[in-house]
Image: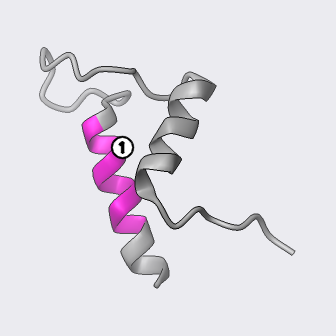
Amino acid sequence: MGKKQPADPRAVVRKLMKAGKVKKKCCRSKPRCKKCPVLALKKAKNDLVKAA
């Protein structure tokens, strides 16, 4: 069986922060930073909608 995805997108982003994949704060210096927590949250919400 596969891993169960948490229903809360914020939990997904928190897990990515602990793993060091996402920054803790948005720096706002670059328009599309790859480690941006804001974009990670948008992506996690989008993935949750697609999975449902």
Residue, x 23% and y 23% (percent of image)? 26
Relative vertical location of residue 27 with respect to residue 39 in this rendering, above or below: above
Q: Which residue is mark 1?
A: 40
Q: Residues within 10 Å of mark 1 (few under 14, many from 20)?
A: many
Residue at figure coordinates x 46%, y 60% from the top left: 8
**Residue at the bottom extreme, as displayed:** 52
The amino acid at mark 1 is: Ala
Magenta span: 38-47
Query: Is 3 rendered above or below residue 15?
Result: below
What SS does tag 1 mark? Answer: helix
Relative to 46, residue 28 above or below: above
Residue 41 falls inside the magenta stretch: yes
Residue 26 vs residue 19: left or right?
left
What secondary structure is the magenta-colored segment mainly? helix
- Name the spot of residue 31 as percent of width and height, x first: 12, 28
- State how the image is colored: one colour
Residue drawn at (50%, 48%) of the image: 11
**The image quarter in which residue 36 lies:** top left
Q: Quadrant of residue 39?
A: top left
Quarter of the image that includes the N terminus: bottom right
Where's residue 40, x and y in %?
36, 43
Does 7 appear in magenta? no
Report the side of 3 relative to 40 (left or right): right
Residue 45: horizontal and vertical position, in percent? 35, 62
- Outermost residue on the right side: it is 1
Question: Residue 5 occupies which quadrant of the picture?
Answer: bottom right
Q: Is residue 18 left or right of residue 33?
A: right
